[in-house]
Image: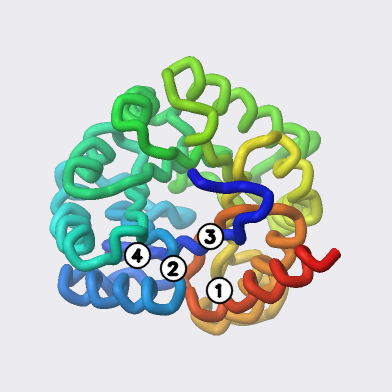
Amino acid sequence: MPFTPDSPPWIMGILNITPDSFSDGGTFLDPHRAVEHALAMEAAGADIIDVGGESTRPGADRVPEHQQLQRVLPVIRALRERLRPGTGISIDTTLAGVAEQACLAGATMVNDISAGEDDPGILRLAAERKVPIVLMHKQGMPADMQDQPGYANVVAEIKDYLLERAEMALRSGIHTDRIILDPGIGFGKTLQHNLQLMANLETFVNLGYPILLGASRKASLAQICDEADRKELVGATCATTALGVLAGVRLFRVHDVKENRQAAAVAWAIKKSI
């Protein structure tokens, strides 16, 4: 990824091709509607479109490979033809088979919430295809990850885990410049865990890899703001984006692209003026 100290942060727009995602489940199952939404996110400032065919919300069931492919491949093929050449397409999956077919269809990046643990072949696939890969921390599986998650020291444990998975990726042949780490806000964490992670983002930035932050419309924000409608958490998400930029986070996975693009731009201007 072309991240340098002088390059502004990137915005990754979320495109869920799922019936059960926590915020927009069922909204973009129609491929035409999904493509139009992706194009709108690109116009609003998205650098990458993250396409996923399996919900990873708390309590979600697993989706088999063939069903993920049925959902995402028509959209990725259409996007590769219609997006600008510089706009990336990420495939959000833990399965090597889905990642491989998505890359053949035009995806340029892999986003794996299991950090290569669900299917180690995804690391070899990323190495062979020479595409960046996001390695995220989660505790448990989506079906049970919010059932009393616990840590002795949440920041230290997640830092050590991410370094371990990055080392595994390097041993699999992935170049260091193509490894992105994600502390996994909301994936097997309580509100207090998430707050501690957000307060210590620089700890993860200092690991030496680009950091992705995915706090958009998460339950912890809804809890803080006492807001039942996740779509009303735009301001809350923008707050995390601004905080992340100042901490050195390089990539933000969000639902509301325009607003978070603005938040990132202002925070980046402030950071550069220091």
Vertical relation: 203 (above or below) 171: below
Crowd band around label 2 with a 10 angstrom C-alpha radius: few (<14), some (14–19), many (20+)? many
Q: Secondary structure at mark 2?
A: loop
Counting residues from the start of the chain, the first of labels 1 and 2 encountered is 2
Under mark 1, the amino acid is Arg
Which badge, 3 or 2, is on the more N-terminal residue? 3
Q: Residues within 10 Å of mark 4 (few under 14, many from 20)?
A: many
| Residue found 48% across the figure and 27% down from its top | 175
Instruction: Identify the residue at the far top of this view.
Output: 171
Q: Give the alpha-carbon distance from disc 3 to disc 1, as whole Å.
A: 8 Å
Q: Can residue 70 be seen in this snapshot?
A: yes
Q: Residue at x 41, y 64 (%)?
A: 14
**Residue receiving disc 3:** 10
Asked which secondary structure carries label 1, the reply is helix
Q: Marks 3/2: CA distance?
A: 7 Å
In which quadrant of the rendered image does the C terminus lie? bottom right
Tell me residue 110's x, y (percent).
38, 42
Pointers 3 and 4 in contact (CB under 8 A)? no
Q: Nearer the viewer, mark 1 or mark 4?
A: 1
**Mark 3 near mark 2, Cβ–Cβ under 8 Å?**
no
270 or 65, which is in the foreground?
Answer: 270
Where residue 186 appears, x then y in whole percent? 59, 54
Residue 97 placement, left or right of 266 = left
In whole angstroms, how far apart are the C-alphas of marks 4 and 2? 11 Å
Looking at the image, is mark 4 or mark 2 earlier in the sequence? Answer: 4
Contact (CB < 8 A) between labels 1 and 2? yes
Of 68 and 144, which appears nearest the observer?
Answer: 68
Q: Which residue is mark 1?
A: 261
Identify the residue at image location x=44%, y=38%. Answer: 133
Q: Earlier in the sequence, mark 3 or mark 4?
A: 3
What mark, if any, has residue 15 been given in the picture?
Answer: 4
